[in-house]
Image: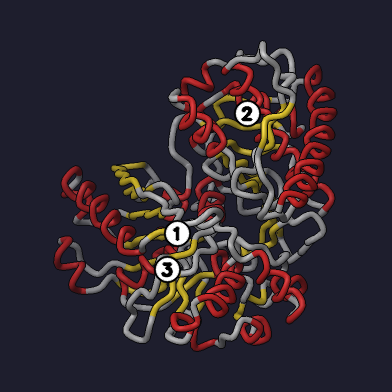
Amino acid sequence: MYLGIDLGTSGIKAMLIDDGFNVVATAHESLSVSRPHPGWSEQDPADWIAACSKVIAEIRRAKPEAWAKLQAIGLSGHMHGATLLDSADQVLRPCILWNDGRSGAQCETLDKRADFRGIGGNLVMAGFTAPKLLWVAENEPEIFARVAKVLLPKDYLRLWLTGGHVAEMSDAAGTLWLDVAKRDWSDELLAATGLDRSHMPSLVEGSDVSGQLRAELAGEWGVGQVAVAGGGGDNAATACGMGVIQPGVGFLSLGTSGVLFASTASYAPNTGDAVHTFCHALPETWHQMGVILSATDSLAWLSEITGKSAPELAALVADPVTAVSDVAFLPYLSGERTPLNDPGATGAFVGLRRANGLADLAQAAMEGVALAFADCANALRKAGTPVEAAFAVGGGARSESWLKIIASATGVTLLVPEDGDFGAAFGAAKLAVACKTGDVSAATFGTPRVSKEIAPDAALAGAYAEKLVLQREAYMALRELDRAEA
């Protein structure tokens, strides 16, 4: 038996699978995000441990005989978070999360100090870990002075599980301290942030063994010796779950944030349109991503202010959509990454009239997210990594009408897997298998059977291309307005 643990922004999920990759049990526990100031986003790492303990206890109760056969654990988690520990491994402050935008000024500073784009393979963005540490150094110097280790969120879970400070390549690439081509920490990039290798965890590949479950936990949980795999950042782990480990078909994740992911056989950075270039969770493999920060979170926000659930809002939209909404929505509620690289970007409805109702707003929100994905698809094409087809995953992928909109807006054919959960927890469990068997081939990381293909609607594609131009113009106009009012 193999356990995958995925530490998400809104909750933690555990999945137990058997040797045939069949799901034996799952459990989920919700998490909350603290936003003490505009643009801030934080979590208490103690909440991760508490939630992880609960999901494991739930699986143990549900499947005690299967649980007793546990051989390995794989980890996945949201990337870029700054978990700061002192010399006694005590947490110094709440973890600053991936969607926290406070470090915009520090990005400009770091960009001038070192070749983050060339060595780190990415633009310096407020969501990444390095500028967060510079913000702490400048705004909380007493805390920065006590920092002994910086861990990514899932690697704080690893510390609890194994007692070791270890990271793996896909997540480490999102810190901006990794030499992504060499798959090793960069002394130059660390020094630019006032850090050195002593502050970093050791590195393994995602399919390697990173340590063994602590004897105390093994005894408490009723298991024998259990290996803990390196695992992967949430997107790389999802790719492992979907079998997206070679160039060709990618995946589109419609979750809190949105990702268009493509595997690459070599390190090929392209920072011009804020494309992310990271190590994959498997050896000698890399990947590129376009990332948007408010995907299903756009509907969640609309749900909060209207009192209608996100599924209720989605149900208001015609299936299939036959005409593009005359209302536009800018989905930049938490800033934006690809291709804008603008943590200060703001959201808006544009073109509202008295006759518009909630159905119009819901469709506009779904289209705004789809057009943000279109920006990502275009950025990957410019980077030389076209995505013609992609597996659709994430909570928002349950809405077929939304997938049809996204396919038409992006020009990407979306592949809907047959019933099953092929997300990050499943990928983490597969990485647990690989750490025991050593097999990183398609025999372990195979693709799921497809239940449906959703092709772009040619009748809508042109209209969405025109609306994308208008959305970009509205963003520029709103940005100038925001700056004028600042």
- On the image, numbered disc 3 is attached to which residue? 155
Q: Identify the mark nearer the N-term, 2 or 3.
A: 3
For label 2, the residue is 366
How many numbered callouts? 3
Residue type marked 2: Met
Q: Who's the residue at 82% across and 58% down the image?
A: 272
Camera-side residue of 353 and 437: 353
Q: Amino acid at mark 3?
A: Asp
- Residue at position x 60%, y 80% from top? 185
Circle 3 SS class: helix
Does residue 249 sit above or below 38 in this rendering? above
Asked if the residue under mark 3 is in contact with the one under mark 1, i.e. CB atoms within 8 Å, the reply is no
Residue 391 position within the rendered picture, expressed as x and y whole percent measured from the top left: 60, 38
116 or 455, nearer to the observer:
116
CA gap, disc 2 and disc 1: 27 Å
Front: mark 2 or 1 = 1
Residue 42: image tag: 1
